[in-house]
Image (cartoon, rainbow, N blue to C red):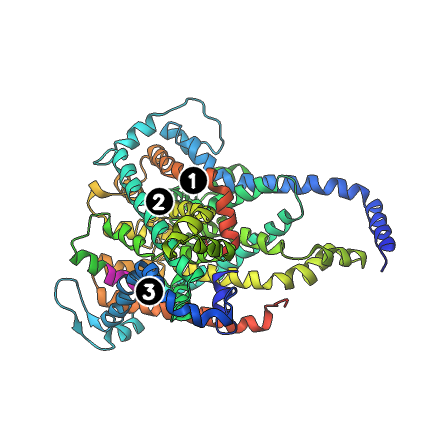
Amino acid sequence: MSALGELSTLGRNKPPGQKPGRAGKVKKRDNLAAYLFLSPWLVGLFVITIGPMLASLYLAFTDYNLIQAPEWIGFENFTRMLSDQRLHNSLQVTFTYVFVSVPLQLAVALLLAVVLDRGVRGMAFYRSIFYLPSLLGSSVAIAILWKQVFGTEGLLNQVLAPLGFEGKGWISDPSTALGTLVVLNVWTFGAPMVIFLAGLRQIPAMYYEAASVDGASAFRRFRSITLPLLTPIIFFNLVLQIIHAFQSFTQAFVVSGGTGGPSDSTMFYTLYLYDRGFGNFDMGYASAMAWFLLVIIGVFTAINFIASKYWVFYDD
Amino acid sequence: MTTETLRSAVVRRRAGTFGWTRIRPVLTHLALAAGALVMLYPLIWMVVSSLRPGNEIFREPGLLVRDLEIGNYKVGWNALSEPFTRYLLNSAVVVLGAVLGNLVSCSMAAYAFARLEFTGKKFWFSIMLVTIMLPIHVVIVPQYILFSQAGWINTFLPLVVPKFLATDAFFVFLMVQFIRGIPRELDEAARIDGCGRAGIFLRVILPLMVPALATTTIFTFIWTWNDFFSQLIYLTDPKMYTVPVALRSFVDATASTNWGSMFAMSVVSLVPVFLAFLFGQRFLIKGIATTGIK
């Protein structure tokens, strides 16, 4: 079961393997041992995660440049965000990226998972090949490659030239620069594809056999059996990829040379946050931005969970 | 419906679509192979281009190399203030520390969550699950301040120490899932033989969770090797650069003048990831399929 599934069922029933009867007796004996085993994680939780979270919440209400002591300025960072055009632009870029690249990536992943699931010979081979870009995609090396492939004299134009297309600098043109990053994200569809494949394997073959006998077409079988039974997996991938896409950084940073250019067309929210915090040591503002990002991701995840009641089908 | 009618229906269907059932696998394979080629083409082209003289890269979309040119690698290796060996070693140290840290700290926490009963277990467990989805940006500014006050900027400590504190919570979750699948009878038997909690963990659980440890190792290896954001923030001294940070400053230093050596060093930087992928595929695919990590 996935982390998401586990989290959503936590309130409803006991975790598997926990027998209600014996818990009381064993409890006392294990406390010390358990907290000893947990001690590295607990130290990390407080020192590396919760402490810094609280500190960043405090800094969000201050003006702080690392040298002078933080100065409390109330909601000034947030009112500044309201009128910050570059921030609005970065939000627009990020939303566009999330809304376009995530559905595309998941659609490609699902399509290939369905094709590969049909007992294709050499399935393991194809699966590995399609998965490889997911591992490499977030690296600086691939960002460099992308910069060349979509450059004025790049691979794409070399391939298109004999077909009669006039080449252009895809990355240096503000209207197509973000698109190249969408392509990069779609290219890494292998990770959700593997999760889809695992999900497809859970669907009992007899459903398909019965549908075949009833004369259902391949498309009909996909629409009436595969799709509904796969909705929990689609939901899981959707939530995961949205959270992931909101945090994209490396590719845009390297492709644009750290500027989010051309003309801020690839200025992702995280890139602007980096620019404020670590480029200009405007730490208070960067913290405010970080908390706003957390709220955005939280809201999107919540919307996803609420909407899931209407389209995710649990077969139990 | 009886078995007999079902079978005859299937037979009828097969007979009726005899040609199609022969052709379809071939078409599927052709489509898949074409797709795989498109997916891999940029990568193969990069490797080939790294072996070409610079002026040919912009004229050749094909994969044929006329004169093998390894000069790109020589030039790239020494293009920055330190030879590339230095950056590879730096990355290796960071990766080794991160892998070791994750293996030790995550397995300990996972054992407690999967096997021990203690007060507040549900509470801590749900906190652990929530931290998996927490964006790094909410903590990075104070973490940076914390580590810079500790004098850790331009050391590998900010990149390695958190791993010893199980901050990569998805590995804790992955291991919890795995340990839940190990029969509890084995723990009981070890306890009857006189093993304590630590004994059970070290002698029973750890040896049995090798697949989960392998998945953790490979994913930590690849992610840490590829990680750019935190290495960019904490490492500003060229002597301490890791491979991604060095590659990026390579781009800035040579602008777009020397694609040949830029590709050469990109290829070098991807080799460890590729090898990890090659040897760890089995675990990688299993790990991602069961927990959804990426």
Residue ID for mark 3: A32
**Same subunit, tags 3 and 1:** no
In this view, the residue farthest toward the bottom is A74
Residue ID for mark 2: B225
The stretch in magenta equals: B138-143
Residue A194, how many percent across, how many down? 54, 51
Residue ID for mark 1: B276
- Asked if residue A36 lies in the magenta stretch, the reply is no
- Tell me if residue A82 comes above or below residue A236 in the rendering: below
- Tell me if residue A23 comes above or below residue A102 in the rendering: below
- Tell me if residue A66 comes above or below residue B31 in the rendering: below
Evaluate if marks 2 and 1 touch, with contact meaning CB atoms under 8 Å apart: yes
A225 sits left or right of B8 in the view: left
Q: Amino acid at mark 3?
A: Leu
Q: Nearer the viewer, mark 3 or mark 1?
A: 3
Residue A66, how many percent across, how many down? 16, 62
Residue toward you, B90 or A152: B90
Callout 1: SS? helix
Q: CA distance from mark 2 to mark 1?
A: 11 Å
Q: Quadrant of the C terminus of chain A?
A: bottom right
